[in-house]
Amino acid sequence: MKAIAKTRPEAGIEIIDMKEPSPGAHEVVYSLGAAAICGSDLTMYRWDNWAPGTVKPLPVVLGHEMSGTVVAVGKGVEAFKPGDRISAETHISCGKCWYCRNDRSHVCSNMVLFGHNVNGCFSEFGLINERAVWKIESDVPLELAAMMEPLGVAMRGAEAVDLQDQPVAIIGAGPIGQMVAAVASTRGAQNIIVIEPCPGRRKLALEVGADVAIDPGAEDPVRAILELTDGIGVEVVIDCSGSVDAIIDSIRYTRTCGHLVMIGNPHVPITIDGLRDIVHKELHIQGHFGRRIWQTWGRTEAFALKYPEKLARIATARYPLIRGHEAFEKALDGTQGKILLLPS
Ligand SMILES: [Zn+2]
Ligand SMILES: [Zn+2]
């Protein structure tokens, strides 16, 4: 079978031939329904930032956002059987550490990442530990189910603070920012303002739920947002960009006593003027890493069922796995929503 893999510690990917997996104890083998390219896959492609220290051992099959159908299960697997439709959690937990024992397995101390430390899902058949398998009980289509993992990240960002009747700013309208706009629009937010340099992504964010889209290259987001909010600013900022400058700017247009929710990953240190702004403005800053297991997953599946058109709109291109190079190049150009990979 074909797979998209990282074989060498340098930029790029390879389409490789490999043997179909067979399940060991507590493992599930599935045939791929659909997979989606994540921003973290692009970091691994470029082999910059955290990738060289985190992605090991090589070679590794990339990909962690997926849906599929179980074809075989190993010894000891009782919760899944051939024919079950599944998606998967990227954070594969140990089940034994303090966090796992205290209902925080999404931040397990011994976390193994699907598609980073063990083979991922960019292959026609894949294998995953049963601890990371989510059984799809509804008839949500497999293409949408492949987007539930990133949707879960967006959902945690959009659910972190009550958005009812509140103005919200979303920094970055890549796929996660688009999903945050989509979720926020279903949670009663009064004015959803997206900040995004790419025109196609601004347009898409408006289509799935944003009310206003600001081009930070054409106007100063601080001034624009203060103008839109009678000079008071927004109650909630949800950063999906990890852009240090944009995050520092956001402190100026967040209301006093407001919230900064961070789900993007900054790759360089952030210096905030003496942190005084945070104290004097009584800002609430919170980060979210992945999905609560399995609380978030039930809600992502419900969202995919209730708003399939919003989620489908965010999938802007589809490629067969064997055209993985083209798919990655398309994703790297920074103009798209989610890019889906389908078995050949
Ligand atoms: Zn991802
Ligand atoms: Zn653990």
Image (tube, rainbow, N blue to C red):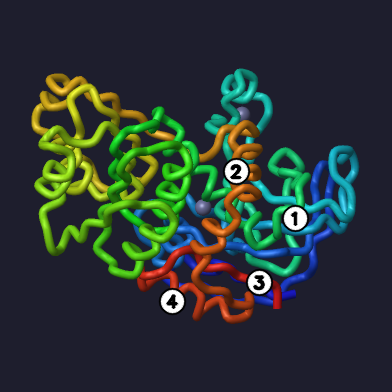
Mark toward the start of the polypeptide (1 vs 2): 1
Report crowding for label 3: few under 14, some 14 to 19, many 20 or more residues within 10 A (C-alpha).
many
Q: State the SS at label 4.
A: helix
Q: CA distance from mark 1 to mark 2?
A: 23 Å
- The answer to whether the beta carbon of the residue marked 2 is less than 8 Å from any atom of ligand 1 is no
The residue to which callout 1 is attached is: 127
Q: CA distance from mark 3 to mark 4?
A: 16 Å
Report crowding for label 1: few under 14, some 14 to 19, many 20 or more residues within 10 A (C-alpha).
many
Q: Looking at the image, can residue 95 be seen?
A: yes
Mark toward the start of the polypeptide (3 vs 1): 1
In percent of width and height, residue 312 lies at 56, 62
Q: Which label number is shown at residue 342?
A: 3
Side (left or right) of 66 relative to 311:
right
Q: CA distance from mark 3 to mark 1?
A: 17 Å
Q: CA distance from mark 3 to mark 2?
A: 21 Å
Position of the N terminus by quadrant = bottom right
Whether the residues at callouts 3 and 1 have beta carbons within 8 Å, the answer is no
Position of the C terminus by quadrant = bottom right
Q: What amino acid is labelled 2 in the image?
A: Thr
- Front residue of this view, candidates 111 and 53: 111
Q: State the SS at label 1.
A: strand
Q: What amino acid is labelled 4 in the image?
A: Glu
In percent of width and height, residue 70 lies at 82, 55
**Quadrant of residue 261 in the image?**
top left
Query: Which residue is at 50% across, 80% downward?
Result: 326
Whether the residues at callouts 3 and 4 have beta carbons within 8 Å, the answer is no
Mark 2 vs mark 4: in front: 2
Query: Which residue is at 22% across, 43% downward?
Result: 247
The residue to which callout 4 is attached is: 329
